[in-house]
Amino acid sequence: MNNYNLYLLTHTIHNRTYLGITNNLQRRIRQHNCEIKGGARYTSSFLLGGNWEYHFIKGKLTKSQALSYERTIKNMRRKGKGKTPVERRMYLIYKVCINLND
C-alpha cells in the first residue's frame, strides 16, 4: 500500500532539521513534540522553547520507497547545497525524490 510519508521537520527556534518516515503524520508530530510517548528520542531533546513543525511532506509512498529515500538522503548529507540546514536538506530531497522520480 502507498500510505507512507517522507517528512522533514524544522524546529521553530533551534536551527535543526529531522528527516523521517511515517504512516500517521498526526501521531508522529505529537510524538516529536512530546505530547504523546514513543519513538522520538532525538527531537525531544530540543523542545525547550519551541516545537517541531512539518516543512516538507512527500506522501503516497510504499514503505520500501520511503525507507529508500530516507536512507539515500541521510547518506548524502554532506553533499547538500545551501547556507542553512533546511536549504541543504531540501536540496537533497528535491534531487532524490522530486527531480529524478516525478
Image (cartoon, grey):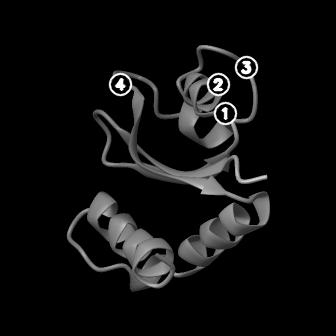
Q: Amino acid at mark 1?
A: Asn
**What residue appears at the point 44 percent right and 69 percent down from the top-left corner?**
93
Give the alpha-carbon distance from disc 3 to disc 1, as whole Å: 14 Å
Q: Left or right: 8 with respect to 60?
A: left
Q: Residues within 10 Å of mark 1 (few under 14, many from 20)?
A: few
Q: Amino acid at mark 2?
A: Arg
Percent x, y of residue 11 = 37, 38
**Residue in the foreground of this view, choosing between 2 and 40:** 2
Cβ atoms at labels 4 and 2 below 8 Å apart: no
Residue 37: mark: 3
Cβ atoms at labels 2 and 1 below 8 Å apart: yes
Task: Please identify, in this view, whether the residue under mark 3 or under mark 2 is nearer the observer.
Answer: 2
Give the alpha-carbon distance from disc 4 to disc 1, as whole Å: 22 Å
Element type where label 1 sits in the image: loop
Cβ atoms at labels 4 and 1 below 8 Å apart: no
Give the alpha-carbon distance from disc 3 to disc 4, as whole Å: 18 Å
Percent x, y of residue 97 = 49, 73
Q: Quadrant of residue 49?
A: top left
Element type where label 3 sits in the image: loop
Q: Which comes sooner in the sequence, label 3 or label 1?
A: 1
Q: Which residue is mark 4?
A: 50
Q: Which comes sooner in the sequence, label 3 or label 4?
A: 3
Percent x, y of residue 64 = 78, 66
**What residue appears at the point 28 percent right and 34 percent down from the top-left corner?**
13
Q: Which residue is mark 2?
A: 27
Element type where label 2 sits in the image: helix
Give the alpha-carbon distance from disc 3 to disc 2, as whole Å: 10 Å
Q: Which residue is mark 1?
A: 24
